[in-house]
Image (cartoon, helix red, strand yellow):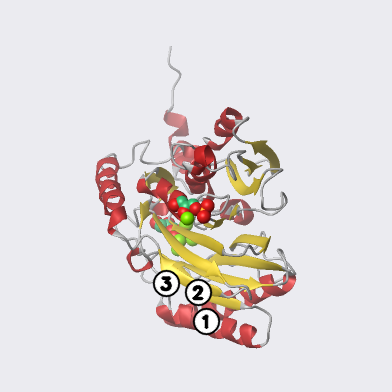
Amino acid sequence: EKITISVIKADIGGWPGHSRVHPQLVETAEEVLAKAQEEGTIIDFYVATCGDDLQLIMTHKKGVDSSEIHGLAWKTFEEATKVAKGLGLYGAGQDLLKDAFSGNIRGMGPGIAEMEITLRKSEPIVTFHMDKTEPGAFNLPIFRMFADPFNTAGLVIDPNMHMGFRFEVWDIKEHKRVILSTPEELYDLLALIGAKSRYVIKRVFPKEGHKIPKDEPVAVISTEKLYEIAGEYVGKDDPVAIVRAQSGLPALGEVLEPFAFPHLVSGWMRGSHNGPVMPVPMHMANPTRFDGPPRVVALGWQISPEGKLVGPVDLFDDPAFDGARQKALEIAEYIRRHGPFEPHRLPMEDMEYTTLPGVLEKLKDRFEPVE
Ligand code: 13P
Ligand code: 13P
Ligand code: MG
Ligand code: MG
Ligand code: MG
Ligand code: MG
Ligand code: MG
């Protein structure tokens, strides 16, 4: 029998500004989900936070895109939004872009990563939670986990994963997708996903001959684009991901290894700047400097045979990642000195909002031809 793991997240108010989630929002979400667990809608849950984003991790047997589960998440965010409004939190209800729930939470504002899987004898998974960045921030680390032999030794030395993986990549501007196989199509894959604001890894699948059925994802990332949904700036869609580990998949340490390098992502201040993503435990995921730098939290779980979430283990709560944090601070200091200049500030088309059209309008009569 299959179990579904759903991670559904929304920013429904920051405390203060866009820094962190107020504990009363977490409590409210826990109350709503505890009731749903009692009623048997979900098997288990955990409410996590990263910066100002509230994340519902749930296990159940209703499959992906279940209107019951999405409706539960929506109701939870609505209840917590009431509390956020009562406290006057910043941007209360920010990511709830529609007034009424109509069966599926996709395209309504929250970010979703879900996978329906046949539990293995032992099922280790990691949920990743990012703030102050966008879904394309997962392109580099997911690529490294499942396709880079310098990251994942298992691709070279474990016969159970030597055949490689398949990547489902979405063109989030044209709303199209393509599946590419590695290692054969490695360069084609990189040609796309290096353009991370447009081509985003949505899922990774095993190949024919793998122990895991070919149609079951081994990784899934939320790819909702808030500004496209809303048609105006409402904050970058701080993403989440679920990754399965071990036994024919990257080992836990191979899943975490990409984050030892704090790569540059877009987001940070006003969703309009490049900066390093800093791996941190949950208690350090409260971005402050220039509203950042961007953060990533990794929570480790074993799924019990009944579908219970055994965890979390706060995986970046380890001095082994001190070096990455230190490096992130150095990069943050360096790139901040550029102020409003690219490549710290994003290129025009990737900024979340801009005064440029207004400035051009004001100056339009003062522009003169150049010989
Ligand atoms: P498994 O194949 O049992 O997951 O072992 C991999 C491992 O433990 C690498 O450190
Ligand atoms: P969030 O996307 O985390 O709400 O941040 C928005 C922002 O503008 C930070 O400066
Ligand atoms: Mg947000
Ligand atoms: Mg916010
Ligand atoms: Mg956020
Ligand atoms: Mg954001
Ligand atoms: Mg082992």
Quadrant where the N terminus sits is bottom right
Task: Name the element at disc 3.
Answer: loop
Say which residue label 1 marks: 30
Circle 2: residue type: Val
Percent x, y of residue 330:
24, 45
**Reading the chain from its start, which is encountered first: label 1 or label 2?**
1
Residue highlighted by disc 3: 21
Do labels 1 and 2 touch, CB within 8 Å? Answer: yes
Tell me the kind of residue under disc 1: Glu
Question: What's the CA distance linking mark 2 and mark 3?
Answer: 11 Å
- Residue 75 location, quadrant: bottom right
Q: Do the residues labelled 1 and 3 touch (CB within 8 Å)?
A: no
Does 204 appear above or below 103? above
User: How many numbered circles are shown?
Assistant: 3
Determine crowd level at label 3: few under 14, some 14-19, many 20+ residues with C-alpha closer than 10 A: many
Mark 1 vs 3, N-terminal side? 3
| Residue 327 placement, left or right of 258 | left
Q: Which of marks 1 and 3 is in front?
A: 1
The amino acid type found where label 3 is placed reads Val
Q: Which of marks 2 and 3 is in front?
A: 2
Q: Is residue 133 visible in this depiction of the protein? A: no
N-terminal-most mark, 2 or 3 = 3
User: Which image quadrant: the C terminus?
Assistant: top left
Give me the disc on residue 47: 2
Direction from residue 94 to residue 335 in the image, left or right:
left
In the rendered structure, the answer to whether residue 141 lies left or right of residue 293 reads right
Residue 107, x across and y down, in percent = 66, 59
The quadrant where ligand 5 appears is bottom left
Q: Which residue is drawn at 59% across and 33% down?
A: 183
